[in-house]
Amino acid sequence: MKNTDLQDYSHKRFNILTGEWILVSPHRAKRPWQGQNEAVSNEVRPTYDETCYLCAGNTRINGEENPKYEDVFVFTNDFAALQNDSPVFSVNDGLLHAQSETGICKVICFSPDHSKSLADMTPSEIQKVVFAWQKQYKELGNHDNINYVQIFENKGAVMGCSNPHPHGQIWSQSTLPNEVDKKNTQQLAYYKKNKRSLLGDYLDQELEQQERIIFENDGFVVLIPFWAIWPFEAMIVPKMHQSNILDMSNNEAFQYAEAIAVITKAYDKLFNTSFPYSSGIHQAPTNGEANSHWHWHMSFYPPLLRSATVKKFMVGYEMFGSPQRDITAETAAQRLRDLI
Protein backbone atom coordinates (compact mmCIF):
# COMPACT_ATOMS: atom_id res chain seq x y z
CA MET A 1 0.00 0.00 0.00
CA LYS A 2 2.76 2.47 1.00
CA ASN A 3 0.20 5.21 1.58
CA THR A 4 2.12 8.18 3.01
CA ASP A 5 -1.13 9.85 4.03
CA LEU A 6 -1.46 7.15 6.70
CA GLN A 7 1.87 8.26 8.19
CA ASP A 8 1.19 12.01 8.14
CA TYR A 9 -2.49 12.69 8.74
CA SER A 10 -5.17 11.75 11.26
CA HIS A 11 -7.42 8.93 10.10
CA LYS A 12 -9.50 5.97 11.27
CA ARG A 13 -8.68 2.31 10.80
CA PHE A 14 -11.21 -0.53 10.86
CA ASN A 15 -10.75 -3.63 13.01
CA ILE A 16 -12.08 -6.49 10.89
CA LEU A 17 -12.19 -8.81 13.91
CA THR A 18 -14.39 -6.63 16.14
CA GLY A 19 -16.19 -4.38 13.65
CA GLU A 20 -14.94 -1.29 15.48
CA TRP A 21 -12.86 1.75 14.46
CA ILE A 22 -9.68 3.20 15.98
CA LEU A 23 -8.44 6.80 15.59
CA VAL A 24 -4.80 7.17 14.48
CA SER A 25 -3.00 10.52 14.98
CA PRO A 26 0.59 10.12 13.67
CA HIS A 27 1.34 13.86 13.87
CA ARG A 28 1.00 13.68 17.68
CA ALA A 29 3.95 11.32 18.07
CA LYS A 30 6.31 14.32 18.24
CA ARG A 31 4.53 16.07 21.11
CA PRO A 32 6.59 16.61 24.29
CA TRP A 33 5.83 14.41 27.31
CA GLN A 34 5.42 16.02 30.71
CA GLY A 35 3.08 13.43 32.18
CA GLN A 36 3.61 10.51 34.51
CA ASN A 37 6.73 8.39 34.26
CA GLU A 38 6.57 4.80 35.51
CA ALA A 39 9.23 3.49 37.86
CA VAL A 40 11.60 1.03 36.20
CA SER A 41 12.60 -1.98 38.25
CA ASN A 42 16.20 -3.10 37.80
CA GLU A 43 15.70 -5.89 40.31
CA VAL A 44 17.49 -9.11 39.46
CA ARG A 45 15.24 -11.91 40.64
CA PRO A 46 16.68 -15.13 42.08
CA THR A 47 15.99 -18.47 40.43
CA TYR A 48 14.17 -19.47 43.61
CA ASP A 49 12.33 -17.30 46.14
CA GLU A 50 11.32 -18.93 49.41
CA THR A 51 8.55 -16.31 49.89
CA CYS A 52 6.98 -16.91 46.46
CA TYR A 53 3.66 -18.75 46.43
CA LEU A 54 4.37 -20.12 42.94
CA CYS A 55 7.91 -21.47 43.32
CA ALA A 56 8.36 -25.24 43.33
CA GLY A 57 7.98 -26.86 46.73
CA ASN A 58 6.59 -23.74 48.41
CA THR A 59 3.31 -23.53 50.30
CA ARG A 60 0.57 -21.39 48.77
CA ILE A 61 -1.66 -19.04 50.75
CA ASN A 62 -4.39 -21.71 51.04
CA GLY A 63 -1.99 -24.14 52.70
CA GLU A 64 -1.44 -26.41 49.69
CA GLU A 65 2.13 -27.30 48.83
CA ASN A 66 3.42 -27.01 45.27
CA PRO A 67 5.13 -30.09 43.90
CA LYS A 68 8.83 -29.95 43.02
CA TYR A 69 7.88 -29.29 39.41
CA GLU A 70 10.66 -29.16 36.79
CA ASP A 71 9.00 -27.47 33.79
CA VAL A 72 5.30 -26.45 33.68
CA PHE A 73 2.90 -26.56 36.64
CA VAL A 74 -0.88 -26.04 36.42
CA PHE A 75 -3.27 -25.77 39.36
CA THR A 76 -6.77 -24.47 40.12
CA ASN A 77 -6.68 -20.77 41.03
CA ASP A 78 -6.87 -20.27 44.79
CA PHE A 79 -8.77 -17.02 44.23
CA ALA A 80 -10.83 -17.89 41.15
CA ALA A 81 -12.97 -15.16 39.55
CA LEU A 82 -15.49 -17.78 38.43
CA GLN A 83 -17.19 -20.36 40.67
CA ASN A 84 -18.01 -23.77 39.29
CA ASP A 85 -20.65 -24.50 41.94
CA SER A 86 -22.72 -21.32 41.59
CA PRO A 87 -26.49 -21.90 41.44
CA VAL A 88 -28.28 -21.16 38.18
CA PHE A 89 -30.27 -17.94 38.47
CA SER A 90 -31.30 -14.84 36.52
CA VAL A 91 -32.64 -11.38 37.27
CA ASN A 92 -35.04 -9.67 34.88
CA ASP A 93 -36.47 -6.65 36.67
CA GLY A 94 -37.49 -3.98 34.18
CA LEU A 95 -34.21 -2.73 32.75
CA LEU A 96 -32.13 -4.63 35.30
CA HIS A 97 -30.79 -7.88 33.86
CA ALA A 98 -28.33 -10.39 35.32
CA GLN A 99 -27.63 -14.09 35.03
CA SER A 100 -25.43 -16.58 36.79
CA GLU A 101 -22.05 -17.42 35.29
CA THR A 102 -20.02 -20.49 36.17
CA GLY A 103 -16.51 -21.53 35.28
CA ILE A 104 -13.13 -22.96 36.23
CA CYS A 105 -9.96 -20.87 36.60
CA LYS A 106 -6.43 -22.23 36.45
CA VAL A 107 -2.93 -20.83 37.01
CA ILE A 108 -0.06 -22.02 34.82
CA CYS A 109 3.54 -21.58 35.98
CA PHE A 110 5.74 -21.45 32.87
CA SER A 111 8.95 -22.52 34.63
CA PRO A 112 10.24 -23.38 38.10
CA ASP A 113 12.87 -20.65 37.57
CA HIS A 114 11.55 -17.59 39.41
CA SER A 115 13.76 -15.27 37.33
CA LYS A 116 12.60 -16.32 33.86
CA SER A 117 9.88 -14.75 31.73
CA LEU A 118 8.88 -16.19 28.35
CA ALA A 119 11.48 -13.86 26.82
CA ASP A 120 14.19 -15.69 28.79
CA MET A 121 13.04 -19.16 27.77
CA THR A 122 14.07 -21.19 24.72
CA PRO A 123 11.53 -22.26 22.09
CA SER A 124 11.83 -25.83 23.41
CA GLU A 125 10.94 -24.63 26.91
CA ILE A 126 8.05 -22.52 25.62
CA GLN A 127 6.81 -25.52 23.61
CA LYS A 128 6.10 -27.27 26.92
CA VAL A 129 3.91 -24.29 27.87
CA VAL A 130 2.10 -24.64 24.54
CA PHE A 131 1.50 -28.35 25.22
CA ALA A 132 0.04 -27.42 28.63
CA TRP A 133 -2.24 -24.84 26.98
CA GLN A 134 -3.45 -27.50 24.55
CA LYS A 135 -4.12 -29.99 27.35
CA GLN A 136 -6.06 -27.45 29.41
CA TYR A 137 -8.08 -26.23 26.41
CA LYS A 138 -9.13 -29.81 25.70
CA GLU A 139 -9.82 -30.87 29.30
CA LEU A 140 -11.70 -27.73 30.31
CA GLY A 141 -13.58 -27.56 27.03
CA ASN A 142 -14.89 -31.09 27.56
CA HIS A 143 -16.92 -29.94 30.58
CA ASP A 144 -20.60 -29.61 29.70
CA ASN A 145 -20.87 -26.17 31.29
CA ILE A 146 -17.71 -24.76 29.67
CA ASN A 147 -18.23 -23.09 26.30
CA TYR A 148 -15.13 -20.92 26.14
CA VAL A 149 -11.54 -21.22 27.38
CA GLN A 150 -9.54 -18.00 27.69
CA ILE A 151 -5.77 -18.37 27.97
CA PHE A 152 -3.88 -15.20 28.92
CA GLU A 153 -0.89 -13.67 30.71
CA ASN A 154 -0.42 -10.38 32.54
CA LYS A 155 3.29 -9.62 32.65
CA GLY A 156 4.68 -6.89 34.88
CA ALA A 157 3.41 -4.88 37.83
CA VAL A 158 2.18 -2.11 35.53
CA MET A 159 -0.26 -4.66 34.06
CA GLY A 160 -1.54 -5.64 37.50
CA CYS A 161 0.51 -8.80 37.88
CA SER A 162 0.52 -9.63 41.60
CA ASN A 163 3.34 -12.18 41.53
CA PRO A 164 6.61 -11.82 39.53
CA HIS A 165 7.02 -15.57 39.09
CA PRO A 166 6.50 -16.31 35.35
CA HIS A 167 2.92 -17.49 35.03
CA GLY A 168 -0.31 -17.10 33.12
CA GLN A 169 -3.94 -17.89 33.71
CA ILE A 170 -6.76 -19.84 32.09
CA TRP A 171 -10.34 -18.79 32.73
CA SER A 172 -13.04 -21.07 31.31
CA GLN A 173 -16.70 -20.19 31.43
CA SER A 174 -20.22 -21.02 30.29
CA THR A 175 -20.73 -18.07 27.91
CA LEU A 176 -18.62 -16.14 25.41
CA PRO A 177 -16.83 -13.03 26.78
CA ASN A 178 -17.52 -9.71 25.04
CA GLU A 179 -14.37 -9.55 22.87
CA VAL A 180 -14.72 -13.17 21.82
CA ASP A 181 -18.38 -12.65 20.95
CA LYS A 182 -17.47 -9.73 18.65
CA LYS A 183 -14.79 -11.78 16.88
CA ASN A 184 -17.13 -14.75 16.59
CA THR A 185 -19.74 -12.56 14.89
CA GLN A 186 -17.30 -10.93 12.45
CA GLN A 187 -15.56 -14.16 11.45
CA LEU A 188 -18.83 -16.04 11.03
CA ALA A 189 -20.32 -13.35 8.78
CA TYR A 190 -17.21 -13.33 6.56
CA TYR A 191 -17.04 -17.13 6.40
CA LYS A 192 -20.72 -17.43 5.43
CA LYS A 193 -20.26 -14.87 2.65
CA ASN A 194 -16.86 -15.95 1.28
CA LYS A 195 -16.42 -19.58 2.45
CA ARG A 196 -12.92 -18.60 3.58
CA SER A 197 -11.19 -17.58 6.78
CA LEU A 198 -11.27 -13.85 7.52
CA LEU A 199 -7.82 -13.89 9.13
CA GLY A 200 -6.49 -16.16 6.40
CA ASP A 201 -7.41 -13.63 3.70
CA TYR A 202 -6.08 -10.78 5.84
CA LEU A 203 -2.80 -12.65 6.35
CA ASP A 204 -2.41 -13.14 2.59
CA GLN A 205 -2.67 -9.38 2.10
CA GLU A 206 -0.18 -8.65 4.88
CA LEU A 207 2.34 -11.15 3.50
CA GLU A 208 2.05 -9.55 0.08
CA GLN A 209 2.57 -6.00 1.36
CA GLN A 210 5.26 -6.83 3.98
CA GLU A 211 4.70 -3.50 5.77
CA ARG A 212 3.65 -4.76 9.17
CA ILE A 213 5.31 -8.21 9.28
CA ILE A 214 7.83 -8.60 12.11
CA PHE A 215 8.76 -12.27 11.75
CA GLU A 216 7.63 -15.44 10.04
CA ASN A 217 8.59 -19.10 9.97
CA ASP A 218 7.03 -22.04 8.12
CA GLY A 219 3.91 -22.08 10.28
CA PHE A 220 3.36 -18.64 11.80
CA VAL A 221 3.48 -14.90 11.20
CA VAL A 222 4.15 -12.23 13.82
CA LEU A 223 2.80 -8.84 12.79
CA ILE A 224 1.46 -5.51 13.98
CA PRO A 225 -2.21 -5.61 12.97
CA PHE A 226 -3.33 -2.75 10.71
CA TRP A 227 -5.90 -1.74 13.36
CA ALA A 228 -3.59 -2.09 16.41
CA ILE A 229 -4.60 0.01 19.43
CA TRP A 230 -1.64 -0.35 21.79
CA PRO A 231 1.67 1.29 20.64
CA PHE A 232 3.53 -1.98 20.05
CA GLU A 233 0.58 -4.36 19.89
CA ALA A 234 1.41 -7.57 18.03
CA MET A 235 -0.40 -10.66 16.81
CA ILE A 236 0.75 -14.21 16.11
CA VAL A 237 -1.33 -15.94 13.42
CA PRO A 238 -0.98 -19.49 12.04
CA LYS A 239 -0.55 -19.54 8.26
CA MET A 240 -2.86 -22.53 7.99
CA HIS A 241 -6.56 -22.06 8.75
CA GLN A 242 -6.83 -23.60 12.24
CA SER A 243 -9.81 -23.02 14.53
CA ASN A 244 -8.02 -23.74 17.82
CA ILE A 245 -4.63 -24.66 19.25
CA LEU A 246 -5.42 -28.38 19.17
CA ASP A 247 -5.12 -28.24 15.37
CA MET A 248 -1.35 -27.77 15.67
CA SER A 249 1.06 -30.63 15.12
CA ASN A 250 4.01 -30.98 17.51
CA ASN A 251 6.25 -29.36 14.90
CA GLU A 252 3.84 -26.46 14.54
CA ALA A 253 3.73 -26.13 18.33
CA PHE A 254 7.50 -25.60 18.22
CA GLN A 255 7.16 -23.02 15.45
CA TYR A 256 4.52 -21.25 17.53
CA ALA A 257 6.86 -21.32 20.54
CA GLU A 258 9.60 -19.85 18.36
CA ALA A 259 7.27 -17.00 17.34
CA ILE A 260 6.51 -16.28 21.02
CA ALA A 261 10.23 -16.29 21.83
CA VAL A 262 11.01 -13.89 19.00
CA ILE A 263 8.38 -11.25 19.84
CA THR A 264 8.96 -11.33 23.61
CA LYS A 265 12.73 -11.03 23.17
CA ALA A 266 12.25 -8.12 20.75
CA TYR A 267 9.99 -6.42 23.29
CA ASP A 268 12.68 -6.64 25.99
CA LYS A 269 15.25 -5.12 23.61
CA LEU A 270 12.98 -2.23 22.59
CA PHE A 271 13.45 -0.19 25.76
CA ASN A 272 16.05 -2.40 27.47
CA THR A 273 13.63 -3.52 30.13
CA SER A 274 11.51 -6.54 31.00
CA PHE A 275 8.64 -5.47 28.76
CA PRO A 276 5.17 -5.55 30.36
CA TYR A 277 2.13 -6.69 28.42
CA SER A 278 -1.13 -8.57 28.52
CA SER A 279 -1.32 -11.39 26.02
CA GLY A 280 -4.12 -13.78 25.17
CA ILE A 281 -5.22 -16.47 22.75
CA HIS A 282 -8.55 -16.09 20.96
CA GLN A 283 -9.82 -19.34 19.49
CA ALA A 284 -12.97 -21.32 18.77
CA PRO A 285 -15.55 -21.80 21.53
CA THR A 286 -15.85 -25.27 23.07
CA ASN A 287 -19.62 -25.41 22.57
CA GLY A 288 -19.66 -28.61 20.52
CA GLU A 289 -20.21 -26.81 17.21
CA ALA A 290 -17.92 -27.02 14.15
CA ASN A 291 -16.76 -23.38 14.44
CA SER A 292 -15.06 -23.64 11.04
CA HIS A 293 -15.17 -19.86 10.72
CA TRP A 294 -12.67 -19.41 13.54
CA HIS A 295 -8.98 -18.74 12.82
CA TRP A 296 -7.17 -18.71 16.16
CA HIS A 297 -4.56 -16.09 17.02
CA MET A 298 -2.57 -14.69 19.94
CA SER A 299 -2.41 -10.96 20.71
CA PHE A 300 0.03 -8.95 22.81
CA TYR A 301 -1.09 -5.62 24.29
CA PRO A 302 1.94 -3.78 25.76
CA PRO A 303 1.35 -0.38 27.41
CA LEU A 304 4.80 1.20 26.95
CA LEU A 305 4.81 4.09 24.49
CA ARG A 306 8.08 6.03 24.24
CA SER A 307 10.42 4.46 26.78
CA ALA A 308 10.56 2.08 29.71
CA THR A 309 8.98 4.80 31.86
CA VAL A 310 6.34 6.34 29.56
CA LYS A 311 3.16 4.32 29.04
CA LYS A 312 0.01 4.70 26.98
CA PHE A 313 -3.05 5.65 29.04
CA MET A 314 -6.53 4.67 27.90
CA VAL A 315 -8.33 7.75 29.23
CA GLY A 316 -10.40 10.71 28.05
CA TYR A 317 -11.26 10.20 24.38
CA GLU A 318 -10.46 6.48 24.61
CA MET A 319 -13.00 6.08 27.41
CA PHE A 320 -15.73 8.27 25.95
CA GLY A 321 -15.08 8.06 22.20
CA SER A 322 -12.96 5.28 20.72
CA PRO A 323 -9.40 3.94 21.00
CA GLN A 324 -6.67 6.27 19.70
CA ARG A 325 -2.96 5.87 18.96
CA ASP A 326 -0.11 8.14 17.85
CA ILE A 327 2.61 5.83 16.52
CA THR A 328 1.41 4.04 13.39
CA ALA A 329 1.35 0.25 13.03
CA GLU A 330 3.91 0.49 10.24
CA THR A 331 6.38 2.48 12.37
CA ALA A 332 5.96 0.09 15.29
CA ALA A 333 6.55 -2.91 13.02
CA GLN A 334 9.74 -1.41 11.62
CA ARG A 335 11.14 -0.69 15.08
CA LEU A 336 10.49 -4.23 16.29
CA ARG A 337 11.67 -5.80 13.04
CA ASP A 338 15.01 -3.99 13.38
CA LEU A 339 15.55 -5.70 16.75
CA ILE A 340 15.22 -9.26 15.41
Image (cartoon, rainbow, N blue to C red):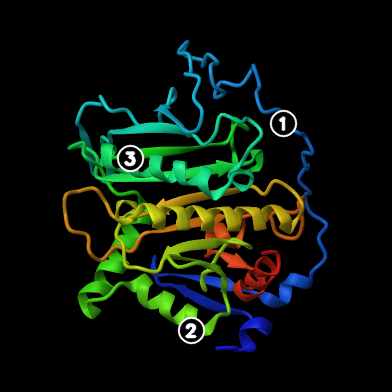
Q: Amino acid at mark 1?
A: Arg
Residue position marked by numbered label 3 in the rendering: 135
Q: Amino acid at mark 3?
A: Lys
Tell me which residue sits at (51%, 50%) in the image: 279
Q: Nearer the viewer, residue 250 or 211?
A: 250
Residue 13 location (% of width, % of height): 51, 76
Q: Amino acid at mark 2?
A: Glu
Residue position marked by numbered label 2 in the rendering: 208
Q: Secondary structure at mark 3?
A: helix
Q: Is residue 211 above or below residue 160?
A: below
Residue 254 location (% of width, % of height): 45, 53
Q: CA distance from mark 3 to mark 2?
A: 35 Å
Query: Closer to the N terminus: mark 3 or mark 2?
Result: 3
Tell me which residue sits at (19%, 31%) in the image: 88
Residue 19 location (% of width, % of height): 38, 69
Q: Secondary structure at mark 1?
A: loop
In the image, is 107 to the left or to the right of 9?
left
Quadrant location of the N terminus in the rendered image:
bottom right
Query: Closer to the N terminus: mark 1 or mark 2?
Result: 1
Quadrant location of the C terminus in the rendered image:
bottom right
Q: CA distance from mark 1 to mark 2?
A: 43 Å
Query: Closer to the N terminus: mark 3 or mark 1?
Result: 1
Tell me which residue sits at (48%, 61%) in the image: 236
Q: Secondary structure at mark 2?
A: helix
Q: Nearer the viewer, residue 305 or 268?
A: 268
| Residues under numbered marks 3 and 1 in contact, where contact means CB atoms less than 8 Å apart | no
Circle 1: is it few (<14), some (14-19), or many (20+) Cα within 10 Å?
Answer: few
Circle 3: is it few (<14), some (14-19), or many (20+) Cα within 10 Å?
Answer: some
Residue position marked by numbered label 1 in the rendering: 45
Q: Is residue 132 above or below residue 123?
A: above
Q: Look at the image and tell me whether residue 49 can be seen.
A: yes
| Residues under numbered marks 1 and 2 in contact, where contact means CB atoms less than 8 Å apart | no
